[in-house]
Amino acid sequence: MIQPLHVVGSRPAGPTAGSLLGLVAGSLVFAAWFNDHLLGIAVAGVFVGLIACVLAGAPGWERFGAALLVGTAVAASGWWVVFHLGG
């Protein structure tokens, strides 16, 4: 007896994955900026392009893209506060 093939659909990544990846991305952007400003601009441009592509071109991934954007901003600004205002 042959059983029919059952394919499980995949769901887009959620906001938790986006925010965690955003924290990593923001940390990389700040580390690059802290070492060399032009490198920081280049790394930030790569992540801005990635976020723009996810938000504009991947239907169903809006929550992931928004969380990625927020996570990146939180991490980069958080590291900036720690290093510049923390002494």
Image (cartoon, helix red, strand yellow):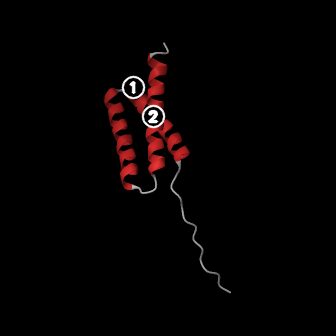
**Labelled disc at residue 26:** 2
Residue at image location 47% in from the left, 25% down from the top: 79
Q: Secondary structure at mark 2?
A: helix
Q: Please identify the quarter of the rendering in which residue 5 is found.
A: bottom right
**Labelled disc at residue 35:** 1
**Outermost residue, right direction?**
1
- The spot of residue 85 in percent (x, y) is 46, 15
**Outermost residue, left direction?**
38
Among numbered discs 2 and 1, the one appearing first in the sequence: 2
- The spot of residue 73 in percent (x, y) is 43, 33
Q: Secondary structure at mark 1?
A: helix
Gap between marks 2 and 1, in whole Å?
14 Å
Left or right relative to 17: residue 45: left
What residue type is disc 1 on? Asn
- The spot of residue 80 in percent (x, y) is 44, 23
Is residue 17 placed above or below 79 in the rendered structure? below
Query: Is disc 1 surrounded by few (<14), some (14 to 19) or many (20+) residues within 10 Å?
Result: few
Residue at image location 35% in from the left, 44% down from the top: 49
- The spot of residue 57 in percent (x, y) is 37, 55
Residue at image location 48% in from the left, 26% down from the top: 78
